[in-house]
Image (cartoon, helix red, strand yellow):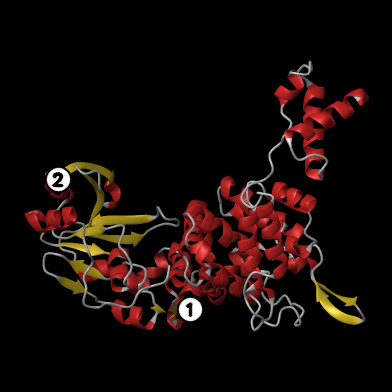
Amino acid sequence: MAMGNLINSDPPLLPAELERILLETDTLQEAYLVGGCVRDSFLGLPQKDFDIEVFGITYERLEKALKRWGRVDLVGRSFGVAKLTTASGEQYDFSLARRDSKVAAGHKGFSITFDPDITPKEAAARRDYTINALMYSPRKGALLDYYGGIADLKQRILRHTSTAFSEDPLRVLRGMQLAARFDLTTATETLKLCRQIKDNFHELAVERVREEWLKWAAKCQVPSRGLQFLRDTGWSEHFPEVQALMGVPQDPEWHPEGDVFTHTCLCCDAMARLPAWQKLDEPSRITYMLAILAHDFAKPQTTSRALRDGKWRIVSPGHEEAGGPVAESFMERISISHAIRERVVPLVTNHLAHLNAVTDRGVRRLAKRLEPETIEGLCLVIEADHSGRPPKPPGLPQGAKELLSKAAEMELQAAAPKPILQGRDLITRGMSPGKEFGQILEAAFEAQLEGKFSDHEGALKWLEEIRPRL
């Protein structure tokens, strides 16, 4: 997940197939790699998606030239985009250089014109940030950097490219995830411009908001940069669960780092540093990052001062359980999928489970409460939470180590317990499916969780013992 060193001299490494298309197609004399693939090459990161912007030709000529190499789908004709699918199955997006003029609210409120005479500098000016305004010509071996993108990459600065930035408020949320992904400090003038368009948030479709949060959660290197970006631009007010964390006090003995927002930022950064998190699939990275973001969402509503052992302390009793609905509300409002939400909520509501005594019964019930999440996943959240309290030492706390060890001993670290007694067991003993059938199976599973039996033989013995009472 860590960024490589800046390599100013190395151009983007193109797939051989794409390089051939760009070098051997006469119509593509003025074709440039643009955006993320150029940026990432100068950060020493692998390039996955290649976007090509073409100057000096019409849409019809572009389509004709690309057909030589495969199927062309005019999926974005109104935006001047043609998708080429080659014989090998690879897909590349080619777009015509265009001029955008904002004529109405929303991401569809742009008048787009295609002008063969537009210059690369004019086209680069409509890109959001200088680090995304870099262009590279494979044919000429030339990097075009009109707005100081390389200098900003070197200094880790996020800076808007031009005043066109304010035409699309989504660019602010892009700034949130870019700052987190590349550990960037935002230029003062860019923060000011973001604050000026804060009220345009309502123009954004929820799906576009969601995608920027997902990039933040899945690809972040220093997630706190994104959260601080929201705070410094004032855009945190559009995410009230995040904003509410700011200024909420914590007991300095347990949380010497400061308020809940500061703690949350440190916890998110700690999660991103965990090798186990970095190796996960994308949905799981998103799940655990959102869980640690939301783990203290209920502290603003549960925090108070109370007398504990003769000392006045700042306490937040019940914040873990109360945090489930708050996390659910946040994720629902930004349209996070149900599959992710059902994993995040039990992680939030159980993130202090390691403070309880570790027993067989407790582990069985915890594993069941977490489903579809796991005790292994919960321990990632616990470790990130525990590591977000500097100068206290980071790492997995002892209680969580004991919990994980006991779960592994019981083979419940990666899955919830499954019912031992099955419907077929009842049928073979002359019972018929029905309402009572389900009630017996439910009671059997409850008894299993309580530890009254742990194998099939014990389940059948339990069944025989309760049958006279049915």
Between discs 2 and 1, the one toward the N terminus = 2
Q: Which residue is mark 1?
A: 192
Q: Toward which corner of the image does residue 185 lie, by quadrant? A: bottom left
Q: Find the distance from the CA under tag 2 to the CA under tag 1.
A: 46 Å
**Which amino acid type is shown beneath numbered disc 1?**
Lys
Point out which mark residue 69 bears. Answer: 2
Q: Nearer the viewer, residue 395 or 252?
A: 395
Image x and y of residue 303, in percent: 79, 71
Image x and y of residue 276, in percent: 52, 63
Residue 421 in sight here: yes
Image x and y of residue 68, in percent: 11, 44
Residue 328 in sight here: no
Which residue corresponds to the image point at 59% horizontal and 73% vertical from the top-left? 265
Image x and y of residue 213, in percent: 51, 60
- Give the class, few, some or many, for how many residues have Cα within 10 Å of label 2's Cα (few <14, many ≥20): some
- Give the class, few, some or many, for how many residues have Cα within 10 Å of label 1's Cα (few <14, many ≥20): few
Tell me whether circle 2 and circle 1 mark residues in contact (CB < 8 Å): no
Point out which mark residue 86 bears. Answer: none
Question: In which quadrant is the C terminus drawn?
Answer: top right
Which residue corresponds to the image point at 53% horizontal and 68% vertical from the top-left? 274
Q: Is residue 283 above or below residue 266?
A: above
Q: Nearer the viewer, mark 2 or mark 1?
A: 2
- Give SS at disc 1: helix
With 79 as the anchor, is 270 left or right in this view?
Answer: right
With 468 as the anchor, is 350 left or right in this view?
Answer: left
**Which amino acid type is shown beneath numbered disc 2?**
Trp
Which residue corresponds to the image point at 78% horizontal and 43% vertical from the top-left? 449
With 160 as the anchor, is 465 left or right in this view?
Answer: right
Q: Nearer the viewer, residue 239 or 315?
A: 315
Q: Toward which corner of the image does residue 440 lie, by quadrant? A: top right
Question: In which quadrant is the N terminus drawn?
Answer: bottom left
Q: Is residue 171 above or below residue 359?
A: below
